[in-house]
Amino acid sequence: MYIQVKLLKGFAKPLTYKLPPELESTQLEGSIVEVPIRSYTSYAFVEKQFATLAYTPSFTIKTAHSLMPFPSDPEYINFIKKISNYHQVDDLHLIKRMRNFLIQEQSEGIAPGLVQERKKAVTLTAEQQNIVTAIIPDLTAKKFAPSLLHGVTGSGKTEVYKKLIVQNFLNNKTTILLLPEVTLALQFENILRGSLEQEIPIFGFHSGISPKIKRELWQALLNQKPILIVGVHLPILLPIANLGLIIIDEEHESGFQEKKHPKLNTKEIALIRAQQYKIPILLGSATPSISSLYNVKQKGWKFFQLTTRYRGNFPVIKTVYLNDKQNSTTKRRSFWISKELDQHIADRLAKKEQAIIFINRRGFSFFVQCKDCNFIFECNACSVSLTLHDRGKLSCHYCDYAQTMPTECPKCAKKEFLKKGIGTQQVVSILEQLFPQARIGRADMDTTVKRKNWQKTLADFQNGEIDILVGTQTITKGYHFPKVTLVGILWADLNLHFPIYNASETTLQQLIQVAGRAGRESLNSMVIVQAMQEHPIFDYLNEVDYPAFYQREIEARSMLKYPPCGRFCEIELMHTDEALLAREATHFAAQLHKNNTRDVFVLGPALPPINKIKNSYRRKIYLKAASMATIIELYQIIDHTRFKSKIFFTPNPLV
């Protein structure tokens, strides 16, 4: 009996080994074994197992040593092969990534969520109970059963999740709960530990957990104990024999697609796994993705709605255009704060209520420009301007390069600069000037890396020790602040004109999520949405209008065959030599055109908005077709070994 393996470290090519007698009767595909290689041993992933060789070897085939303890999961190898084909990556990459993470140290750059008190069991509303009753039979039906839960902000989607998690545990099955950010995963862990009716072992599986927890999780998987696993990207890659339910909260979030290559899409992988394992999967959101709503209508997904808030009422939402004559700069105290928002903040402060001010940019200014020669400070490694932060620090948000702001221009030696744009730090500075009596806090990526500071800021805000919280998308979901009666959104149209097909969708989802922080337990709450110019999406800011937005958006995408009405993928080529990259990108596109007999629409190569990151230049080619299988078939025809550039394939890119 023989096995074909790939080493977890070392050679990339498959190797063949003979099995020792004690392992010959064991099904090893998808397992990890220890094998001899030269003068040492190494772990390897078993791809195939066969009784005889198809050739006569000219050398002695070595014998594998032992089997690494690995959870028994019969479907695992087929699942890994499916997602490696879908994302066009080596299946070994997925196994190595999962195993390497198991032995990594805990990240210190992750802020924990707020500590929750244990709560008594909640009595479900009629809407919630009807949803739970409808999904429970799917837990034992042994079939792929996708469901979409559209619950308005504050409607109690979490209570539905908890009931299903408990029932799945009672069925002796494991649940995976996926969230788009590690901070949100930590927050959910805290909530669930304090509120589940049943004592269920809960394991986080993300960069915020310790090696000890990872070992305990692996042991639980080996023993096939029913558990709950909470995380972002990694839980879906674990071998789990008794997996019975997958839940994806905030399913619309682009955070489920990784930012680094290969850009694995966790939501799509989860759907593939649920289909492979014949289990139910529940996707929940206050602003469901266009693709999920499309699947309800076109593929028969179950659809459930929570239409009322658990406590509190919906806020009043008003859009203010800063280019309107009524909001001219002569009538307001700050360029970035409208007269109306200014008045509402003052009113909330007088009433001892709280406000959230949202701006989806951190830092002080987008860029700094010399007033005399127009020189702009840029990152040498990336084709982006440096962002000005407080204390005079210029930073690149792509490679983390930083420098001190000089006192004079490096080009003309003049000393006057223009600071353009705005970020969270400048908003705090403006508010401190406008409302000197207010207690103001900030929550963005710069503060989340400092664990104690982040947790203290959230706790202080929840306890009423901060009056105004300024933040980015880190505060748009997962947190319940009962005293917030005002949300101000600055520069709401900032990302609307970004060159991606789903810019309107992602912007509206973010605005509704931010607006949902207001009025959780209040009858009188307000959301002021500030924009530079008018746009159709501002007609759909009330959550009840979201279905109308779907109809508008799906009609536009249907005409252009963008997802979900067609399949779309991105091919990215990268190299440190820009001239070589340009030649190879053109040649790659030409090869796609030459071999295109499959009705695939080829676009590019094109320069991305940021064409250089960490000293690597980039070119992108886009493919559109009726099916992803058609796109993959064309992509695989091209001989990638002829290109010196790194080539990455991303199906249905979200960012």
Image: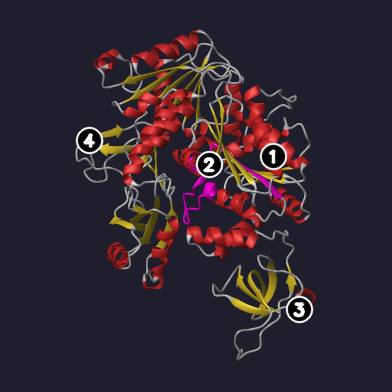
**Could you tell me the amino acid type at mark 3?**
Pro
List x then y, in percent, for residue 52: 67, 83
Which circle, 2 or 4, is nearer the viewer?
2
* Mark 1 neighbour density, 10 Å: few (under 14) some (14–19) many (20 or more): few
Which residue carries the number 2 mark? 300
Which circle, 1 or 4, is nearer the viewer?
1
Label 2, label 3: how far apart the Cα atoms are: 49 Å
Mark 2 or mark 1, earlier in chain: 1
Disc 1 is placed on an element classified as helix
Label 3, label 1: how far apart the Cα atoms are: 45 Å
Disc 4 is placed on an element classified as loop
List x then y, in percent, for residue 348: 48, 12
Task: Name the residue nearer the viewer: 411 or 205.
Answer: 205
Disc 2 is placed on an element classified as loop
Which residue carries the number 4 mark? 371
Residue span colored magenta = 243-268
Mark 3 or mark 4, earlier in chain: 3
Q: How is the image coloured?
A: secondary structure
Which circle, 2 or 3, is nearer the viewer?
2
* Mark 2 neighbour density, 10 Å: few (under 14) some (14–19) many (20 or more): few
**Dot 3 and dot 4 residues touching (CB under 8 Å):** no
**Dot 2 and dot 4 residues touching (CB under 8 Å):** no
List x then y, in percent, for residue 588: 32, 65
Label 2, label 4: how far apart the Cα atoms are: 59 Å
Mark 1 or mark 4, earlier in chain: 1
Tell me the number on the disc at residue 20. 3
Q: Quadrant of residue 154?
A: top right
**Horizontal side, residue 193 vs residue 336: left or right:** right
**Residue drawn at the location 54% of the way across and 26% of the way down:** 153
Question: Is residue 361 in view?
Answer: no
Which residue carries the number 1 mark? 137
Mark 3 or mark 1, earlier in chain: 3
